[in-house]
Amino acid sequence: MDKRLNVVLLIDNEPLYAPYVIKQLLSGLNDNLILKAVVFTEGNYRKISDKQNKQEINNLYGSFNSFMLNLFYSYKSAVLNNDAENNCFRVLEKAGIEYRVTNRINSDEIVDFIKSKEIDILFSLTHHILKSNILNAPKLVCINRHPGKLPKHAGLQPILYTMLEQKDSQQITITQTMHTMVEQIDAGKILIETDYSIPRNSSLFYGYTVVYKDTTRMFNTAVENYLSNQMYTHDMNQRKYYSFPNKEICKEFRKLYKIFTWKEYFNNMGLKDNIKQINRGGGK
């Protein structure tokens, strides 16, 4: 296809991975792709009260880790306010790219904004659930990034559940998948999947850092595969959907693995490191 395609990115408004991904997309998108706009999502994406959501996140990380992560994100946010090279909003403004910040991703206002960009492809890195009005906004396709293998790890916290399943292995294989989006969660056609081999002593944040660092390459390939109709439907009979881990599962995970290491904590959760342990599988 000779025509350049307009892309709108949906991404959670947080100070760790969002600045990294946006800078990578701006410098690394295929020549036929144009990042036209970014929508930052905020707020509680789960259908539970804010109090329950906070408690369940605390159960996942543990009280001390939760406290330290809150400090980390508060510090990162404060630093970014005065960092023109990495502040998402300033980076986009410098590049002449419009953006919106919302806690109502499916609102008419946001859908109209996206459509106004003559969008061809919607790329979702948000945890918020997209409804039909926004899924139908692009001319071609909505592509979702899922940090798990489909259909066996659909739903929430796939890296955590993958690590638990492989607790007896010296090397753990985590998977990142990009797929077309339909209204059923994590049920679209697979465009590309990549396996990564990480050491048994890896932290949860290390797993997420590994997949985030490969986001731009995978998105470029996912678009190429979509345009050449190289995609496949996974066996929904093998589908397993995971909910947010309960308190017992969270305790088990923290007995076996770290949420983060102190080296990662003081080094931007490893985003600045060269991660040598990546093994890219032969994604379809």
Image (cartoon, grey):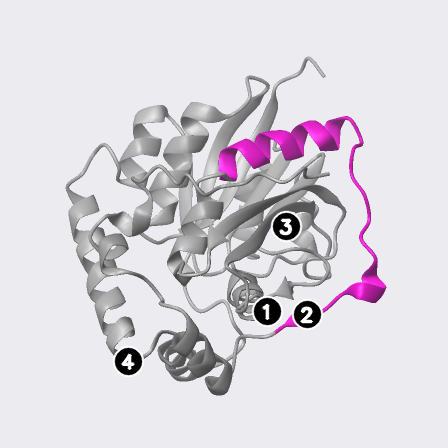
Q: What is the magenta range?
A: 215-242
- The nearer-to-camera label among 3 and 4 is 4
Q: Quadrant of residue 183?
A: bottom right
Q: Position of residue 39 (x, y in %)?
A: 46, 45
Residue under numbered circle 4: 63
At x 55%, y 17%, the residue is 31
What amino acid is labelled 4 in the image? Answer: Ser
Residue placed under numbered mark 1 in the picture: 165
Q: Quadrant of residue 102?
A: bottom left
Residue 40, label in figure: none
Q: Position of residue 7 (x, y in %)?
A: 56, 32
Contact between marks 3 and 4 (CB within 8 A): the answer is no
Query: Marks 1 and 4: which is nearer the front?
Result: 1
Query: Which class describes the residues within 10 Å of circle 4: few (<14), some (14-19), or many (20+)?
Result: few
- What residue sits right under mark 2 in the picture? 241
Q: Which residue is mark 3?
A: 134
Q: Residue furthest top?
A: 2
- Left/right of residue 141 with respect to residue 246 in the rendered view: right
Mark 2 → mark 4, Cα distance in angstroms: 27 Å
Work out whether residue 273 or residue 47 is closer to the camera in this orientation and state it: 273
Q: In the drawing, does residue 58 fall left or right of residue 262?
A: right
Q: Amino acid at mark 2?
A: Tyr
Residue at 63% x, 35% y is 121
Q: Is residue 203 above or below residue 78?
A: below
| Residue type pointed to by label 3 | Ile
Q: Is residue 239 magenta?
A: yes
Label 1: few (<14), some or many (≥20) within 10 Å?
Answer: few
